[in-house]
Image: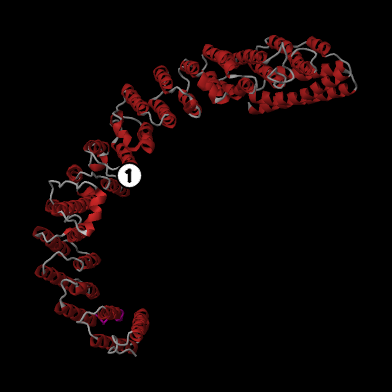
Amino acid sequence: MEADQERYLEEAVTVVREQAYFMKQNLDQNSLREALKHSSNMLQELRTDLLSPRNYFSLYMTVFDELIFLESHFLEERKNGRKMADLYESVQHASHIIPRLYLMITVGSAYIKTKEAKASYVLKDLLDMVKGVQHPIRGLFLRFYMLKTMKDLLPDRDNEFEDDENDVTDSIEFILRNFKEMNRLWIRLQYMSSQKDDYKKEEEREELKTTVGENIERLRNLEGLTADLYQKQVLPNILETLIVCEDVMSHQFLIECVINSFPDEYHLLTLQPLLEGISKLHKDVDIKTTIITLLDRLSEVAGTSEVSIFKVVQKYVEEVFIRFNSKIESNLVIQVSLLNFAIKCYPGELEYINSILESSVNLIKKSRLEKLSPESMRLLVKLLSIPLDTLSLKILEMPQYPQLLKYMAYGGRRTVSLRIVKAVFKSKRKLDNQDIINQLLSFIEPLLKDDEEMEEEPESYEFEEEQQSVSKLIHLIYNEDLDVYYELLQLIKKEITQGGEKRMRYTLPSFIFNLFKYIYLLDDCISLNSKAEAGSPTDVYEEEVEDLGPIPKLPSVTIPKVFNQINELLQEITTPYPDITLRLYCQAAQVIDRVYNKEEQLEEFAYDFISDSLTVFQDELSDSDEKLRAIKLIVSTLSHLECFDQQNYETLSDNAAQYCNKLLKKPDQCDSLIVASHMFVHKKYENGESLRKCFARCLKIANSAMKDPENLSLLIRILNKYINYFMTGVEQITAGDINKLIELINEHIKQITEDGKRDKVKACIKFFENTIEALRKKKKENQATFENIIVE
């Protein structure tokens, strides 16, 4: 079949070129009659029924090029005195209608250009004549040729063909009449041959649609086409032509041509009739694309209109949903587009957005589907997510938002919930009242607890992202009224504890840190009230009282009550997450130290927190690296606390030091004891005896570990700590201690060298040499202090 098409085309093109050759030869010889005869023979090839639309177009373009040459010769004939009227009449004697009409159009173009006749006269005559060709393909290309030939000759505003009798309205009428006939011919193409299948017919029509669309293009390019003419003459005629034909392809293509071709301002002016026309299109039209295209165009100009057009648009969109046979997915795509339109053009109108969500809920109800498709779910996510990007917490004021959320599968609800959390956090708005928090918790419930619909656990990285986002949200809870603030915290606490251990790993630390913040605020409030009651605020608070204005009232909640709650919460996660619990115990003790005012109950809490951290260290941790980090954290914390009496501090510090001795690896024991030494040089709880015992134990462990030469670094770290304490005036560390340790290190280096293992400890030796060099410089700077230290 394809081979036959190629052969038919080649034969026809050969004839065209042959006859064109003779035509040009006769023109050169001034034999116009013979030239017209050959041109007629050339045009005879366009009468063929054998070519497909694509190949017919190739043949047409070959003929078109030759007709351009012929027209230029006609104009030359005019210069030589030949009248175009005579020539126009002469070509009408061609024996066949196709050659006759092509020649008439070609001469007609020259006729108008020479201005022997009014453009309107020629255009109307040609329109009447071309009716004689009713074959769909031949008729379409004939009229297409007429459009192309006359495109620059149409009377238009301020052009040479406009006068008192010819104006742009004549051009509009010419194009509209031609458009109507071309559309009819295009539709008839599908009924041409019963031997072709429907797909082939549709394919051929698809290839020819641009010939019909050329009419819309010509209308668009008319300079004199005003908004008024478009509203009263152009659009009504186009819509009438479309609606009457009831053809799906015609409706689909041409309405999109109208929307894409004419200015946005014209669409805004003619919105109601345009929407009404769209709503009357064939029910099988892919209305989704049409509506989306129109909304995109309108979004550029809708904001300039003094009157809102949203309700008008939505009214016709609702009619479209009722009339057209569209799937739920297509309708939801339209809703997404309408939502984008509303947010872009009317960002402050929450009513519009809520009405779109309500309409979407109704669409899903009417679909009566037991389960929405993945594509529908994806679109629901868009409908619920788009408002978040611009409205943030305002979505909580939309009653239809949670209604639409219910139709999503668990995974989709999780996705939207995460978007909500991120949007709220991005807004940085404080969550300061119970209604907002309750509404928000209901929206993000899939992130807070497991669901019966959950078929499988989310991926670990997804779960972690979700819970970390919720944790950030917790930090936004705040209210200046401390009683209200505490109630809000209790509200969120209930949700956190019901979420299970796996969520509490992420959310509980954030909640506890918010409780710490509450404690600091409560302590400040208590201090301000105490100073105010005393009537003589100290210098520290005097400025604060003036800045803060009225003294805040004392809440009913006490600091011990909050710490008691913290203790209860930490006990819930001790077993599953001992490392987190231990760190929070230490942090809680530091908070007490900051707000401590010699209240006995707070000291007890601090004592319990440190004791519990030691218990967690001993009973719950098993990994040696974790245990080393944990004991270092505990002793570091203790070394900074001042909220204990002497006896309690000594008990805790001695216990902590003993736990350092229980670490599995000797280097870890030594390392932790070096850090633990800070507990015994505390400015409030200094204990020289315990310090010497601590370092004695350190040295013993370090010496016993010297079977591995790399443990030489332990002795050097002890030396550095000695020097540090000596420089800060710790009496228990003397110059003699430093000298003995230097001597001991040198002996070990000597032994290591003799054993041929010096290369293994190059870094340690360099560390030692740098230490000695630094000590030498210190001695030079401060001879009196370092007089007794021997540095070679």
In terms of image quadrants, where is residue 209? top right
Magenta segment, prevailing SS (helix, strand or loop): loop
Q: Position of residue 749 (x, y in %)?
A: 32, 86
Q: Can the viewer see residue 477 in this picture? A: yes
Tell me the quadrant of the picture where the C terminus can be found. bottom left
In terms of image quadrants, where is residue 172? top right
Residue 709 among those drawn in magenta: yes
Q: Which residue is mark 1?
A: 428
Residue 678 among those drawn in magenta: no
Q: Which residues are magenta?
A: 705-710
Q: Position of residue 709 (x, y in %)?
A: 30, 81
Rendered view: 716 above or below 511 = below
* Furthest residue in direction right, as rendered: 29
Residue situated in front as seen by the camera: 517 or 221: 517
Residue situated in front as seen by the camera: 721 or 486: 486
Residue situated in front as seen by the camera: 643 or 6: 643
Q: Is residue 413 left or right of residue 58?
A: left
Determine whether the residue tagged by mark 1 lies in a helix, strand or loop: loop
* Furthest residue in direction front, as rendered: 536
Tell me the quadrant of the picture where the N terminus can be found. top right
Q: Can the viewer see residue 241 in this picture? A: no
Q: Position of residue 89 (x, y in %)?
A: 80, 10
Q: Amino acid at mark 1?
A: Lys
